[in-house]
Image (cartoon, rainbow, N blue to C red):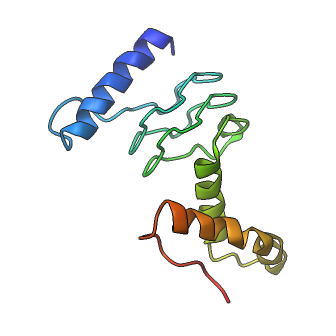
Amino acid sequence: MDAKELDRLMKLHREWLESGGKNGERANLEGAYLKGAYLKGANLEGAHLEGANLEGANLKWANLDFACWPLWCGGTQAKIDRRLSLQLIYHAFNQDHQDKAIRKALEPMRKYAQEFIDKYRIDAPKLRGR
């Protein structure tokens, strides 16, 4: 996807967010090739990102709340800030892991998952365990 098209979609998405869905349109970036894209500070709340290639994309200070993070190789190696790192840790930590070794490996991450709640989402569900 070229920068001009991405800018157009982001403008429509911003209008969609600001109007509560009455104007503009929700960003549909499903399957988009965004490798190396500059999305620093972008508000991608609620955007469709399924299958998007975000490899190497700059997502520092971007808002990805209620967006679908692509869980494939194209969703790796993005440049992310502490808030997004904590959010991803929180979601990984707060699953009902059936594998005891995975639960044990994640336990040292508890403090980071809790930091996400304390600093950014006090309304988030409490952490599992303990």
Which part of the image, by quadrant, shows the C terminus?
Answer: bottom right
Instruction: Name the residue rendered at 55%, 46% in the picture.
Output: 69
**Residue 105 locus on image (x, y percent):** 83, 71
Q: Is residue 55 above or below residue 93?
A: above
The residue lying toward the viewer, choosing from 53 and 65, is 65
Numbered label tally? 0
Residue furthest out toward the left: 22
Horizontal side of 75 relative to 41 (left or right) equals right
Residue 118 screen position, x and y as percent: 53, 68
Q: Could you say where residue 94 lies in the image, as x and y percent from the top left?
A: 61, 72
- Position of residue 59 relative to residue 122, above or below, is above
Going 45% across and 46% down the picture, which residue do you hit?
67
Point out the residue furthest to the front here: 119
The structure residue drawn at horizontal position 31% and vertical position 35%, both measured from the top left corner, is 26
> Residue 124: horizontal and vertical position, in percent?
46, 70
Q: Nearer the viewer, residue 49 or 125?
A: 125
Q: Residue furthest bottom?
A: 130
Image quadrant in which you'd find residue 52: top right
40 horizontally vs 75: left or right: left
**Location of residue 61 with respect to 82 vertically, above or below:** above
Q: Identify the residue at horizontal 45%, vertical 69% (top origin).
A: 122
Front residue of 50/43: it is 43
Q: Is residue 60 above or below residue 127?
A: above
Is 23 on the left-hand or right-hand side of 107?
Answer: left
